[in-house]
Amino acid sequence: MRQLTDKWSDAHLRRTYDTSAAHLLVVAPTERELAGLRPNRLAGFGVAELGIGHTAADNLREILKTRRPKILLSIGFGGALLEGMRTGDVVVSTEAAAVQLPTRRVSMHPELTNDAMSALIATGMRVTKGSILTVPVPLMSGEDKQRHGALTGASVVDMETFWIAQEADRAGVPLVSVRTVIDEMHHDLPDLVAQITADGGQREWYHTLRAMKNPANVGALVPLAVRSRKAVAALLAIVDTLVPVLTKHPPIRAAHR
């Protein structure tokens, strides 16, 4: 699956693959979170990198105007908001909320969510269902993550899922949303994470190399690199498991909300 070599399209969307005639569209905030997946027209799936934060909604909206898939799969990293969740754990989202809109929640498609859950459990991965909280900036401290988890009841946090879910809901496209934990609840994140997200994730290596020039940062960056590798491995397993399942799934209507 990851050996396919379709080139990036020349569309105005940043690093977006050809998504035409896709039964399934797989989206993620960054290229790294796409886990090396390339589109396959014959298999019926497209791939798109949407960007970090609210930018993801803007880019998805443009795609859905002309290239609407039958099913949307959103994947990526998330931070744990619950004690006991470990790096590499998988959370299949049941609903999404945003701190900016505390009374608004968007539900994922229940049948597809259950199908994804069953397929992932069968692989032996640690998989749970839970709601996801979308925030405008990363939750940098363990204390902050614990507080948000207690206030909202969410299992995991990211910066895109609510906005993606809202656009899918408006377009009537059934959504499956899956996140793998990269930072556990008690992990404090280094300043590097805030720098990368503020830059839209476009110069991750630049910020990383710059941070490593300061020996004081190494103690924080090495554990982050280890957790990142575990999370990427989980995303690879998610892609390898769910893409074949969802591309073969019969067309399904979005849940009425």
Image (cartoon, rainbow, N blue to C red):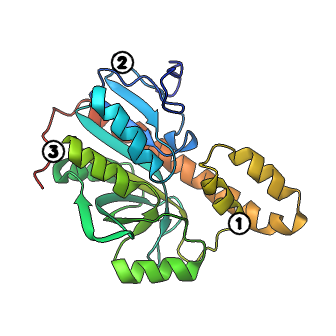
Going from N to C along the chain, the mark reached first, 1 or 3, is 1
Q: Residue at x 41, y 78 (%)?
A: 149
Kindly identify the amino acid type of the residue bearing the numbered disc 2.
Answer: Arg
SS for dot 2:
loop
Name the residue tied to disc 2: 41
Task: Give the distance between the C-alpha atoms of the residues marked 3 and 2, in whole angstroms.
Answer: 23 Å
Task: Tell me: residue 253, above or below residue 69.
Answer: below
**154 or 97: nearer the eye?**
97
Task: Give the distance between the C-alpha atoms of the residues marked 1 and 3, in whole angstroms.
Answer: 39 Å
Q: Determine the image quadrant of residue 205.
A: top right
Q: Residue at x 29, y 31 (%)?
A: 65
SS for dot 1:
helix
Name the residue tied to disc 1: 191
Kindly identify the amino acid type of the residue bearing the numbered disc 3.
Answer: Ala
84 vs 198, left or right, is left
SS for dot 3:
loop
Q: Are marks 3 and 2 in contact (CB under 8 Å)?
A: no
